[in-house]
Image (cartoon, rainbow, N blue to C red):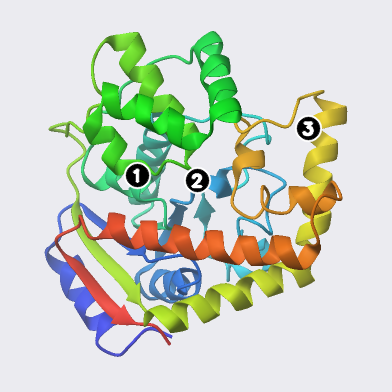
Amino acid sequence: MTPTTLLPKIKSFLKTAKNPLIVVLGPTASGKTALSLEIAKAVKGEIISTDSRQLYKGINISADVLPVEKRENIPHHMMELFPLEREFSLAEYKDMALQIIEEIKSRKHIPLLVGGTGLYISAITEGYDVPRVPPDKVLREKLYAQAEKYGAEYLHKKLEKLDPEAAKRIHPNNIRYVVRAIEINKKTGKNKPDKKSKTDKFDVMMIGIKWPRETLYERIGMRVDEQIKRGLVEEVKKILTYLKKVHKLKEASSIPSISSLGVKELIPYVKGEQTLDECVEILKRNTRNYAKRQLTWFRRYKKIFWIPGK
């Protein structure tokens, strides 16, 4: 439930905001979904996911997509749109999200951005002038091959030489983002920009959920255990079957679903290379590390109304 101090603050914000946009953020397993539902019901809101994994079909458990029957009649957008092998750029996300925001406003409802992918949040709230560079498949294959042969750190160092600022923002293990940043640099001869456009100005209220670190880690562990009970292993098996048999695609880090948190960690178990317990522990560790990176990104936002987790 929303704290008693939060809803009055939101309603006060909405009274003065000319172009309101509410953002509910926090690390994974912090309780964003439950909080966003409460806010949406209170202000006639509609939810736009800012989780990059929730864009894809077939990874509902690993991406924690809220089932339709649990959405309490609140419209949810940017969920389960694309097949697993589809590449989706930041520019595409921004264009689609902005269009949805306009549609929500036309219904006299309040748009809520909800999720933990900081780059997606920033693209909307800070009006990123996102580079629209078409993919270079030959270059991508070359870079992914280098990552597989020499490791993620090797590729990240390559980016660091080309674009030190982008390298600071992108974690070495996020191979897709590293490749994209190198691709933009190579295609345009310029560093990946963080320029802000003069359009898309919103009155933004950011609400963050904060937990003590140890409590958050416990919640992450419980969430992973619950995902296993809900059938995460079977989901990963279906993903691999789909990509291999239906589309005849290789297992590669370039495929969004394969590189998704909760999928890549269980592949060694499905292939008989590691035990389930080993893979589950790796997934919990990687999820904790992901939460740390999310919190690091959120520190860039100057005005977040933090509330304690409950």
Give residue 161's position: percent from left, percent from top. Answer: 28, 24
Labels 1 and 2: the sequence-earlier one: 2
Q: Position of residue 285 (x, y in %)?
A: 55, 64
Q: Secondary structure at mark 2?
A: helix
State the residue position of label 2. 52
As measured in the structure, the alpha-carbon distance from the residue carrying label 1 to the one carrying label 3 is: 27 Å
What residue is shown with label 3? 243
- Circle 1 is placed at which residue position? 119
Q: Amino acid at mark 2?
A: Ser
Q: Residue 39 — which label?
A: none
Query: Quick check: 154 above or below 42?
Result: above
* Residue 29 located left or right of residue 229: left
Q: In terms of image quadrants, where is residue 195?
A: top left
Callout 1: helix, strand or loop? helix
**Image quarter hosting the C terminus:** bottom left
Q: Amino acid at mark 1?
A: Leu
Amino acid tagged 3: Leu
Task: Name the residue rendered at 71%, 60% in the picture.
Answer: 279
Mark 3: secondary structure? helix
Contact (Cβ within 8 Å) of mark 1 with mark 2:
yes
Counting labels gives: 3
